[in-house]
Image (cartoon, rainbow, N blue to C red):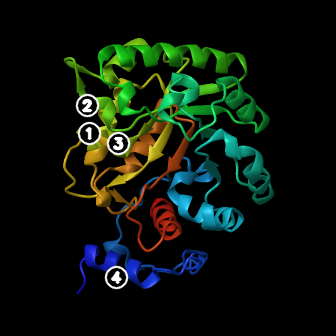
């Protein structure tokens, strides 16, 4: 019998070179036979919150969005997702009309981080633009949240680097508020990498204004950095508005640098130890507004099949 690792390799090899295959077989539901023996039935879990507004971060299906955006978004809608989160405000103009046609809501989008840090020198392939343009793009699309989601290693070497970022984010958060938008900070694992006797996370928590820059907590990145996501939620309980639901492969070592993350660290929501459903319920208690499923790689055959598997887990 194939173990999970060999089974993934077999599936991936069988679909190699068939660019359209990920769209096949993703629209149908499987049916399970109900157990009618009431003597063995356990008490059902209470309904999960957020299912009627459940979103997917489009980074999950970036490969399929590059092939056929409309078919990809249609498949996500048919799976059951109710909203999508964008990775760049500059793509809203082209893709929002498709989402509108499909009834997919868009409440949040990441933005180009250099519009906040000013480090366009680290992005020689990019054409610089102003943060005000990202605000305009988000406003025209009717978004509620703009998410800052990355910081290059060159910009997080010292405690002063993190303090500088917090000040820049506070200024951007105020500007966003004045234009009817809420900024948010999305973590990775490097926020817990030691720096001068502390961590970037603690420095941000101390210096960043929670009303101007609440968190979009990614539970995967917190856990792979050796943190308990629920404990982190306790620490940011009055300043968290969004959750990224992402699962960690069992047995993955603790790492606080992106370069050290194993390729198989990412999993479908039902395949790891992070208590996703409990965290969703706790998030509701704390006033989290939206939850987004995300998987960066290590797909079960295709990114869309992984997106379906995670959705089915939450629905059952």
Q: Are marks 3 and 2 in contact (CB under 8 Å)?
A: no
Q: Residues within 10 Å of mark 1 (few under 14, many from 20)?
A: many
In this picture, residue 78 sits left or right of residue 258? right
User: According to the image, label 2 marks what residue?
Assistant: 193
Which numbered circle lies on residue 120? none
User: According to the image, label 4 marks what residue?
Assistant: 10
- Secondary structure of the residue carrying numbered label 1: loop
Tag count in the figure? 4
Chain-order first, disc 1 or disc 4 = 4
Task: Determine the CA span between mark 1 and mark 2.
Answer: 8 Å
Task: Determine the CA span between mark 2 and mark 4.
Answer: 36 Å
Task: Determine the CA span between mark 3 and mark 1.
Answer: 6 Å
At which x and y percent is residue 73? 66, 61
Question: What residue is at 70 percent from the left and 16 percent from the top?
Answer: 178
User: According to the image, label 1 marks what residue?
Assistant: 225
Mark 1 against mark 2, which lies toward the viewer? 2
At which x and y percent is residue 171? 57, 13
Chain-order first, disc 3 or disc 4 = 4
Q: Are marks 3 and 1 in contact (CB under 8 Å)?
A: yes
Task: Determine the CA span between mark 1 and mark 4.
Answer: 31 Å
Q: Quadrant of residue 41?
A: bottom left
Q: Are marks 3 and 4 in contact (CB under 8 Å)?
A: no
- Secondary structure of the residue carrying numbered label 4: helix
- Secondary structure of the residue carrying numbered label 2: loop
User: According to the image, label 3 marks what residue?
Assistant: 221
Q: Are marks 1 and 2 in contact (CB under 8 Å)?
A: yes
Task: Determine the CA span between mark 3 and mark 4.
Answer: 28 Å
Mark 3 against mark 4, which lies toward the viewer? 4
- Secondary structure of the residue carrying numbered label 3: helix
């Amino acid at each position: 019998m194939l173990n999970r690792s060999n089974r993934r390799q077999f599936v991936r090899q069988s679909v190699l070179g068939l660019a359209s295959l990920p769209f096949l077989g993703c629209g149908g539901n499987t049916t399970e036979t109900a157990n009618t023996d009431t003597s063995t039935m356990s008490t059902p879990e209470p309904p999960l919150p957020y299912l009627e507004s459940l979103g997917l971060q489009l980074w999950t299906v970036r490969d399929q969005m590059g092939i056929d955006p409309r078919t990809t978004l249609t498949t996500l809608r048919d799976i059951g997702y109710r909203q999508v989160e964008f990775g760049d405000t500059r793509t809203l103009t082209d893709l929002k009309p498709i989402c509108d046609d499909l009834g997919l809501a868009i409440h949040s989008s990441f933005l180009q981080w250099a519009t906040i840090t000013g480090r366009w020198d680290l992005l020689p392939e990019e054409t610089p633009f102003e943060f005000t343009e990202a605000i305009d793009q988000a406003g025209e699309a009717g978004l509620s949240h703009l998410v800052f989601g990355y910081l290059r290693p060159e910009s997080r070497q010292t405690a002063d680097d993190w303090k500088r970022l917090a000040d820049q984010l506070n200024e951007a958060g105020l500007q966003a508020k004045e234009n009817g938008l809420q900024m948010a900070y999305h973590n990775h694992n490097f926020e817990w990498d030691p720096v001068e006797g502390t961590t970037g996370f603690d420095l941000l928590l101390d210096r960043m204004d929670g009303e101007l820059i609440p968190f979009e907590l990614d539970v995967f990145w917190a856990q792979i950095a050796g943190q308990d996501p629920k404990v982190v939620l306790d620490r940011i309980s009055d300043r968290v508005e969004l959750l990224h639901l992402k699962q960690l492969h069992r047995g993955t070592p603790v790492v606080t640098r992106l370069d050290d993350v194993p390729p198989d660290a990412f999993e479908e929501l039902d395949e790891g130890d992070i208590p996703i459903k409990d965290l969703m319920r706790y998030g509701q208690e704390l006033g989290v507004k939206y939850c987004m499923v995300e998987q960066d790689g290590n797909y079960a055959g295709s990114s869309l099949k992984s997106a379906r598997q995670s959705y089915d887990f939450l629905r059952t």
